[in-house]
Amino acid sequence: MTGLLPHALIVAGPTASGKSALAIVIAERLGGTIINTDSMQVYRELRILTARPTLDEETRVPHRLYGIRPAAEAGSVAWWREQALAAMDEAHAAGRLPILTGGSGMYFAALTDGLTDIPDPGSDARAEARRLLTEQGSAALHASLAHVDPATAARLKPEDGQRIARAWEVWRGTGLGLAAWQNRRSAPVPWRFTAILLDPPRDALRAAIATRFDAMLRDGALDEVRNLLDLHLDPSLPAMRAHGVPELTAYLRGTLSLEEARRRAELVTGQYTKRQATWFRHHTLAPQTRANTINARFSDLTQFSERERAELFTFIENEG
């Protein structure tokens, strides 16, 4: 039965590990369609700071779910999953291999393990959660959540304002805590997944982050943030908290030097990649098959040797 399921490839790993470069190489070789699995690359206003594929790269192979949502609208795992499944079906119908590429572990888990169908909490609950987050701050709202939904609060850090607000709105709008809803997970999707996990050494990853952020500044990241600020969006929206946005915002408002903004952005990104790497090491990305781990030594994985590349393609083709 499993062998009859359509096949999809996962290329996962921390930010700046070279996922996009590797995915393009694979897609060109095997006839694939690359499907975004990064929660920030869905926002159309953030091409540079989220390191979305370039226009040239998007013409080389089909790319889906990049820059398709305005920053004014918060995306969600459920919304992305629905879009990703449609893109996978489209690729399969065209005879192409769906290649899911990104660093959002929760998105991969929702796809391969199933997702909880949480009812819409409603606009009143959402407005209340955002108001409380703004008025009280994330730590105080976390403490309030701990009184009414201790199971969910225990899973969240007090500084994680966006997720705390989401948990509050779910509890207020549905009468049931987020953790309780998540225990009612749906069945996995009818696909067979092969996973490639990139896990570069920490020093190589830090160097890649620094190099990439300098390139972002040269390519117009400051103008991108200026344009985003001109929209006067709610600062709690996910796009406003993308790596580099708060730091460059502080520079543009005169509260940080550019050098300090760069240092902080690189530090925050590095801390995030450490959490990503930890998550990936403790979760099975392809529960229906075995997963392969590549310990990349390059920031640009197109530098793989011919032997390494041949082994990689043999692995994918054998799994498919």
Image: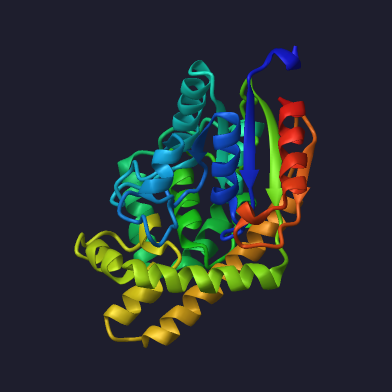
Residue 62 placement (x, y as % from top left): 44, 34
State whether residue 297 is above or below residue 186: below
> What's the coloring here?
rainbow
Q: Residue at x 44, y 55 (%)?
A: 165
| On-image quarter of the N terminus | top right
User: Residue 144 versus residue 49: which sits nearer the camera?
Assistant: 49
x and y, in percent, of residue 314 in the image: 76, 33
* Residue 58 x, y percent position in the rendering: 41, 42
- Give how far across and how far down residue 221 sits, in percent: 34, 68
Asked whether residue 170 is in view, the answer is yes
In which quadrant of the rendered image does the C terminus lie? top right
Give the residue at the far front of this rendering. Answer: 306
Q: Is residue 245 left or right of residue 314?
A: left
Question: How many circles with numbers are drawn on the protein?
Answer: 0
Instruction: Identify whether 278 is placed above or below 315.
Output: below
Q: Nearer the viewer, residue 76 or 3?
A: 3
Residue 104 in view here: no
Res 241 → quadrant: bottom left
For the point 64% across and 34% down, which residue is it? Answer: 9
- Nearer to me, 110 or 42: 42
Q: In the displayed image of the protein, which residue is found farthest to the right?
A: 290
Q: Residue at x 42, y 81 (%)?
A: 261
